[in-house]
Amino acid sequence: MQRFDGGIHIEDSDEDHLPPVLCLHSLFLDGRMFDGLSELAEGRFRMIRPDFRGQGRSAPATGDEVDMETLADDVEAIVDGLGLGPVHIVAQSVGGDVALRFAARRPAAVRAMVLLGSSARAEPPENVQQFSPIAEAVAAEGFQGEILETTMAIMFGQTAREDPDRADLIAFWRARIAALPPALAPAIRGTIRRASAVDRLGTIDAPVLVVSGEEDIARPPAWADEVVAGLPHAELWRLPDVGHSPTLEVPDLVLPRVLDFLATSARAGV
């Protein structure tokens, strides 16, 4: 079922009798990045997949920037509006930025989390200087040429991009990213200008699985290590030959473990 609440597009499997899992997507993608996870979770979890405001199939942003706190406000409204109670969260990249902020605000509302290609720190100043022109280029022209290829190198590891057996996968996501509109620029600005949430990690009580690809250039392994060190109940899963998007690059490896981690937390009633 598809819902639109306050301009936010939400896909909800509506399996109310099952433990709820809130899936928070990466910048440049949307809730459809979790199609494979949702298919595998059918009959085990209720899958709720919003598109962040200003991204995907949600309403365009109304301002110059969509910041992380606003997105956390939206997540809070979704959890309360759907009456989800303690919820599992699976979050990729920017989704992790938002998930950590929400979990720090409402620790009792989160049962367990899986963070993939995520971090808690602010973007380093040198990166802000490098990435800001990308946001302005997208605002002017969308995702074409060098901007498109840079985005693909950010989103997928070198191994996946150069693997002939995954050429169709890479072509699929290149075409989808190439079709993104210039209206994505406010979301890009909010991502690269985000404040640090490292000092909030100690307030999060839920068990967390942190998945980090060794080829992740957007959120390097050391950033994932920092998250694990700051969380009271976290474990790290480091993946060789994987970049920023583990669920897309190696789904056969990653998706079953994600669901097993959530199932263990659900059984434990954490």
Image: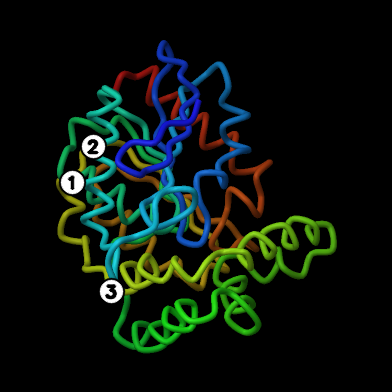
| Mark 2 neighbour density, 10 Å: few (under 14) some (14–19) many (20 or more) | some
Q: Position of residue 250 (x, y in %)?
A: 66, 50
User: Does label 3 or label 2 sit earlier along the sequence?
Assistant: 2
Q: Nearer the viewer, residue 155 or 62?
A: 62
Determine whether, in the image, residue 73 is placed left or right of residue 17: left
Q: Say above or below: 80 vs 151.
A: above
Tag on residue 193?
3
Determine whether, in the image, residue 100 is placed left or right of residue 160: left
Evaluate if marks 3 and 1 touch, with contact meaning CB atoms under 8 Å apart.
no
Q: Say above or below: 103 vs 64.
A: above
Check disc 2 and give the amino acid type.
Ala
State which quadrant residue 241 falls in.
Answer: bottom right
Q: Position of residue 16 (x, y in %)?
A: 41, 14
Q: Nearer the viewer, mark 2 or mark 1?
A: 2
- Name the residue located 22 percent from the left edge and 66 percent from the top edge: 196
Q: Nearer the viewer, mark 3 or mark 2?
A: 2
State which quadrant residue 27 falls in.
Answer: bottom left
Q: Give the SS element for disc 2.
A: helix
